[in-house]
Image: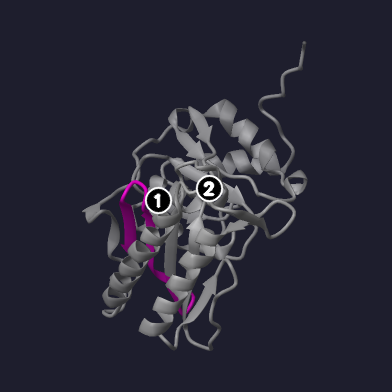
Amino acid sequence: MPDRPNVQAELSAAIEIAREAGATLLSHWGRNVRAESKGEFDIVTVADRASEELVVSRLRQRFPAHAIVAEEGGGYRTASDYCWYVDPLDGTTNFAHGFPMFNVTLALEHEGELTAGVVFDPLHDELFHATRGGGAFLNGNAIRVSRTGDLGASLLATGFPSRKRHRNVNVHFFYELAMSTHGIRRAGSAALDLAYVACGRLDGFWEFGLSPWDMAAGVLLVREAGGRASDMNGGKVDLYGAHVLADNAAIHDALLETFREVFAGHVRFPLPEVTA
């Protein structure tokens, strides 16, 4: 069922703002932007801050009563039933190193339900958008998830945290799925990974420890493109939860079964011995 009538106005605003923020990122792209540490490994650039300042200010102008949760801390807390999740530069490490995989992402939640989402890749001029019940689109054209039904023939993506990697268990899942699929991609931008699942470039994506702004828009895109999203145990997606899985629906059960085995410590493919 299509969402509220005014969601189209909210979506249009999000698209306009994402494009403007994308232009801001491109104005810094390729200029050897200075990266600062915001933790043991996490970094932030002047581009992050400029983009977030623009996005938050535009949202506050358009929707002054709405709450905003933004990655760099420039959000706006209210008691509203509406909440925007903003990542002004998803793929900061890529951006800082000149690796061409980054985006701006915005998503709107109303009374606990995702209603609109935008992921904009300014470098390749690709804008993904979705509304609840209204479908998913890439540059205005409807998109659908892939039809791959065999896990062994699938191409997946995942990610690893910038910090505290030694505490992250994903390497176990990465290895098992790398051995039982066509391959795993790790490109450093969760929002784009999810958008690629939505348009069929990838068959599935999973990751541990994402933040709400990393996955909100992408989860909606996947659902509206005919895919499935859950946590890695098959439960409801929690934007503040420990992990997320999104795929084309056809391989969802097979992925959950693999995850169950790995969580239980069962290994299908023992690691090979290292020899000189």
- Residue drawn 69% across the image and 37% down it: 172
As drawn, is 102 to the left or to the right of 138? right
The stretch in magenta equals 108-130
- Residue 101 image position (x, y, % from top left): 46, 45
As drawn, is 57 to the left or to the right of 129? right
* Res. 248 in view: no
110 magenta-colored: yes
Which quadrant of the figure has residue 100? top left
- Residue 155 image position (x, y, % from top left): 46, 34
Classify 188 as above or below 11: above
- Residue drawn 76% across the image and 17% down it: 273
Tag on residue 32? 2
Q: Amino acid at mark 1?
A: Ala
- Residue 79 image position (x, y, % from top left): 53, 89
Viewport quadrant of the C terminus: top right
As drawn, is 48 to the left or to the right of 19? right
235 magenta-colored: no
Most frequent secondary structure within the magenta stretch: strand
Coloration mode:
one colour
Tag on residue 28? none
Tag on residue 195? 1
The Cα–Cα distance between marks 2 and 1, rounded to whole angstroms, is: 27 Å
Q: Amino acid at mark 2?
A: Asn
